[in-house]
Every structure is written in C-alpha cells, then in structure tokens.
Image (cartoon, rainbow, N blue to C red):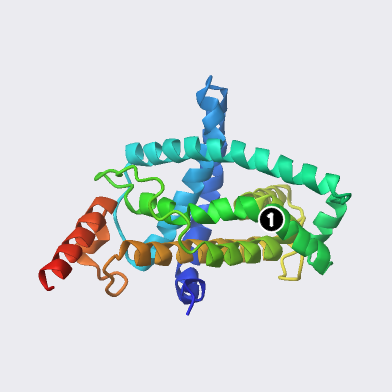
C-alpha cells in the first residue's frame, strides 16, 4: 500500500494539532516579516518563514506519531536559515527553467491563458486543470523532494542539534507527496492562492471584527463548495496529510524503529545522529552474521 494512503489515519491526529497552531503561525509570520528591513538578511526572511511554517507542521505530525522532543530556538533558526539559502538558489534555477519552458511553448505557437489556468484551479476544465498541474509541477516536485530532509530537520530541532545533512533522503516518496499536494491545491480552489494559514487567519480577524461591531459574519458558516471556511478546513487537513506522509516516508528511509505512538521511550528523543548510529549498528550486525 502506498505511504500516502497509509498516512491517512495519522493525518487526522495531525489535523487537530495543526488547526490549533495555525493562528499562532500566522501571527508569528507577521512579526517575523518585519525582519525584511534588515540589509541582506531580509532577502532570506521569506524563505526562512516558509521553512519555519513547514517545520512546525511537520512537528505536528511527529507529535501525533509519538515524538515528543522539545524544540531549541537556536537549532530551529539554524535549520530555517540553512534551508532558506538552499531554496533561494533552487528558486533561481526554477525561474530560469520555467522561463525557458515558456519561451519554448511560445516558439511552438502555443499560448498559456491565465484565465484558463484560473478555471483549471476550480476543476472547470480537465484541459486547463492538466495545464495548471504541468505549470506547477516543477515547484511541486521540488517541494515534495525536500519533504524527507525537512522532516529529519524537524525531528532534530531539539537541544541535541542538527547534523546539516540537508539533502539526505532527497526525492524520497516524491510521487505520493505530489498527489497529496494536488489534493490540497484543488480542494482549496481560489483560497489555495493564500493557503490555509492566511485564509484561516482572515476568517478569525473578520469574525472578531464582526463581533466587536455587532454585525453578522461576512462569510458563510456552512461547508458549501467554494466557501472560505470549507476551503480552509480541507486545505488544513490536506497539509496535515502531507506532513503525515512526509513523516512516514522519513521513518521508512531512515529505518527508525517504531513502537506504538506515545510509547517510544528514549526513541522520542531520537536525532538524525542517533538514527545514523542505529543504521550503522544494524549494518555491522548483518556483516557479523555472514
């Protein structure tokens, strides 16, 4: 059974943790964005915030899986800075690649209609939905390919530190993760442009404002299709599914010993260094039995 299917039960126990954390992630993002004014460092701030949001989501899935290691601010900052530099370089390469692809498409006499791509987001046209997936595929592949390295980093953000193996596990489980990302994209419709964190934060702010002003809510409270509340909840669950899939993929790649969730004992404090030593010990044991 594919891991992205196996991770469905874990996605629900991740979901409620992530849902509680989302407003605080939005507030933290707003505060951290002020660091953009710092010369040079400001270039890395958006990437660092993106990594931070991903790591915190992954930690929700890790907690749901039974990993209860505390978090160290210095280690977390190092992880965010390190991956933001990598993603900045990858982003430049992706932009050059996409520019070349669009140029080739134009040379072939084809046109990419932004309105059509927008319609594809709603699934109104199979053709444009496929075109939208094709356009977003390079970015989705890159994001999915780094899921396992980021999970390893999220699992080792405690005081023990991180071993800087940024590309360890790169590309593991990429197909399943991209499928989950497609579910996230089309389930959120127009609200996927903003993501569940900012859409959810907007819902909370407008709700508070409406209560203070004594007015009715400016958005629908039912779960009808294409509504902000429905889109936010489904995107939040789909993100939880992504985090859960990444954690299970990381466990399989790193050969992490697994017991019952919440009953890991010392395993809940495993770092990537511990995992590497376990793998070496297992290899030595296999050699000795030959």
Q: Going 25% across and 71% down the picture, which residue do you hit?
A: 263
Is 35 or 46 nearer to us in this picture?
Answer: 46
Q: Residues within 10 Å of mark 1 (few under 14, many from 20)?
A: some
Residue 78 picture location, percent across and down: 38, 37
Residue 243 picture location, percent across and down: 48, 61
In the rendered image, the residue lying farthest to the left is 288
Is 152 or 210 nearer to us in this picture?
Answer: 152
Q: Going 32% across and 71% down the picture, which residue do you hit?
A: 261
Q: Going 84% across and 67% down the picture, which residue do you hit?
A: 125
Residue holding disc 1: 192
The count of marks equals: 1
Find numbered disc 1 in the image and state the secondary structure of the residue it sits on: helix
Image quadrant in which the C terminus is located = bottom left
In this view of the protein, can residue 191 be seen by the observer?
no
In the rendered image, the residue lying farthest to the top is 39
In the rendered image, the residue lying farthest to the bottom is 1
Residue 230 picture location, percent across and down: 68, 66
Give the side of residue 131 with respect to residue 246, left or right: right
Is 163 or 227 nearer to us in this picture?
Answer: 163
Vertical position of residue 271 compared to residue 76: above or below: below
In this view of the protein, can residue 159 be seen by the observer?
yes
Give the side of residue 223 with respect to residue 180, left or right: right
Give the side of residue 285 with respect to residue 116, left or right: left
Question: Residue 124 lies in what quarter of the image?
Answer: bottom right
Q: Going 54% across and 36% down the picture, which residue do you hit?
A: 89
Is 287 or 230 nearer to us in this picture?
Answer: 287
């Amino acid at each position: 059974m594919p891991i992205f299917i196996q991770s469905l039960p874990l996605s629900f126990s991740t979901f409620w943790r992530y849902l509680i954390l989302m407003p605080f992630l939005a507030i933290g993002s707003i505060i951290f964005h002020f660091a953009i004014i710092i010369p040079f460092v400001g270039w890395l701030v958006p990437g660092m915030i993106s990594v931070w949001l991903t790591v915190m989501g992954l930690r929700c899935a890790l907690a749901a899986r039974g990993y209860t290691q505390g978090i160290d601010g210095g280690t977390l900052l190092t992880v965010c800075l390190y991956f933001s530099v990598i993603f900045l370089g990858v982003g430049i390469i992706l932009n050059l690649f996409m520019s070349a692809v669009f140029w080739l498409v134009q040379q072939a006499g084809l046109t990419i209609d932004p309105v059509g791509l927008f319609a594809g987001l709603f699934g109104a046209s199979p053709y444009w939905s496929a075109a939208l997936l094709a356009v977003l595929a390079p970015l989705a592949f890159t994001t999915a390919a780094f899921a396992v390295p980021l999970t390893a980093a999220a699992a080792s953000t405690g005081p023990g530190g991180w071993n800087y193996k940024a590309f360890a596990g790169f590309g593991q489980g990429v197909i399943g993760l991209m499928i989950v990302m497609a579910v996230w994209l089309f389930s959120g419709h127009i609200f996927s442009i903003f993501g569940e964190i900012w859409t959810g934060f907007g819902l909370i702010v407008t709700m508070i404002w409406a209560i203070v002003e004594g007015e009715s809510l400016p958005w629908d409270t039912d779960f009808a299709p294409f509504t902000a509340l429905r889109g936010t909840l489904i995107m939040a669950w789909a993100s939880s599914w992504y985090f859960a899939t990444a954690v299970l993929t990381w466990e399989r790649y790193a050969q992490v010993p697994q017991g019952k969730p919440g009953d890991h004992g010392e395993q809940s404090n495993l770092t990537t260094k511990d995992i590497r030593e376990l793998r070496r010990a297992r290899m030595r044991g296999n050699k000795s039995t030959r």
